[in-house]
Image (cartoon, rainbow, N blue to C red):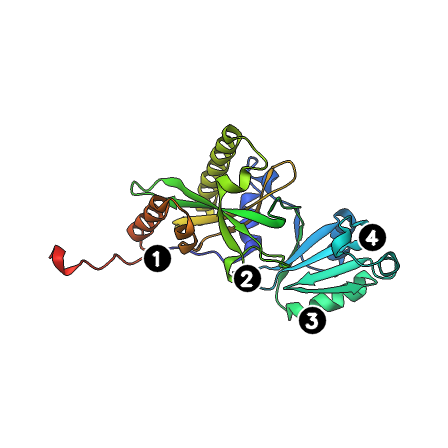
Amino acid sequence: MSIQKVSSKWKKMMVLLKDKYIAPFHPETRKYSLTALEQMCQIYRTVYIKPEQGTHGKGIMRIERTSEATDNTDEPSSEDVTKAPYKLHYVKKKELYCSIADLHKAILKRTLGKSYLVQRGIPLLKYQQRPFDLRVMVQRNLSGNWEATGIIGKVAAKGKIITNINGGGRIVSFEQLMMPYLTKDQTTNLKKELFLLGVRTAKCMEKTYPRIKEIGLDIALDGQVKPWILEVNTSPGLYVFGYLPDKSIYRKIKKYATAYGRLKPAPKSKSSK
């Protein structure tokens, strides 16, 4: 039986919002439209525009209401703010727009008719002045039960709005990222909480998609170190866990992935024959 993959971010979110435990961890998200854009920009200072289907952070855009920005190192002058209250940021480019209508037109040029979502922006914690998020790996173990097998931090490259490795981000251990924010005990407790959230999410997903074997949760931590689920991947990258100092984590992830058919078994060496 093949491993099930679910590409639609919207469909996955609709499934998870039915779970009363998981729902509060989701930032508000709507299908993209001019009305949704206008309303979300009125409610939140920062919103993200992301493709409903896609990987590696491709196509993601960020919008900021510059009139309420507080980071003076990266904002236009007061005169520019008055004229252009919206800043659109994609890849490493930044553009200012005077109205929602103009902003909408600019976004449509980049979406190329594809389905997109607009999501509340979570102010990410930072590591060495760069934002980061987390990836929690959850897999079916050798007994067929769900098990959280690893957690990593993804730190954005300079000037980037995404943390993906493909976009220049780098891997840092969860414990190292948490050192400025939490005690060791608090870090341990948060890790347990995230692992429980991961397993709960997998169990919720399998009710609708019974052939999934693994998920990767992208988790944001806000200023109060509250977790937010940004996305759930049903075919998450495995190799990134190989960057961790503790190689036993990567070995377990590969072992489980081989058992349920994601990876091919390693060829036996001649000496073992």
Q: The residue tagged with tag 4: helix, strand or loop?
A: helix
Horizontally, residue 72 falls left or right of residue 173, namely right
Q: How crowded is mark 4: few (under 14 residues within 10 Å), some or many (20 or more)?
A: some
What residue does disc 4 label? 67
Residue depth check, mark 2 versus mark 3: number of the one nearer the observer: 2
Is 258 in front, or is 176?
176
Asked if the residues shown at circle 4 and circle 3 are in contact, with their CB atoms under 8 angstroms apart, the answer is: no
Looking at numbered disc 3 in the image, what kind of residue is underneath it?
A: Lys
Residue depth check, mark 1 versus mark 2: number of the one nearer the observer: 2
Horizontally, residue 268 falls left or right of residue 184, namely left
Distance from the alpha carbon under mark 3 to that under mark 1: 37 Å
What residue does disc 3 label? 109
Horizontally, residue 9 falls left or right of residue 61, namely left
Distance from the alpha carbon under mark 4 to that under mark 3: 24 Å
Distance from the alpha carbon under mark 4 to that under mark 1: 50 Å
Asked if the residues shown at circle 3 and circle 1 are in contact, with their CB atoms under 8 angstroms apart, the answer is: no
Looking at numbered disc 4 in the image, what kind of residue is underneath it?
A: Ser
Q: Quadrant of the N terminus?
A: bottom left
Q: Residues within 10 Å of mark 2 (few under 14, many from 20)?
A: some
Residue at 54% from the left image edge and 60% from the top image edge: 168
Asked if the residues shown at circle 4 and circle 1 are in contact, with their CB atoms under 8 angstroms apart, the answer is: no
What residue does disc 1 label? 2
Q: The residue tagged with tag 2: helix, strand or loop?
A: helix
Q: Which of the two labelled residues, at mark 4 and mark 1, occupies the earlier sequence position?
A: 1
Q: The residue tagged with tag 1: helix, strand or loop?
A: loop
Q: Residues within 10 Å of mark 1 (few under 14, many from 20)?
A: few
Residue depth check, mark 4 versus mark 1: number of the one nearer the observer: 4
Give residue 167's mark. 2
x and y, in percent, of residue 88 in the image: 72, 61
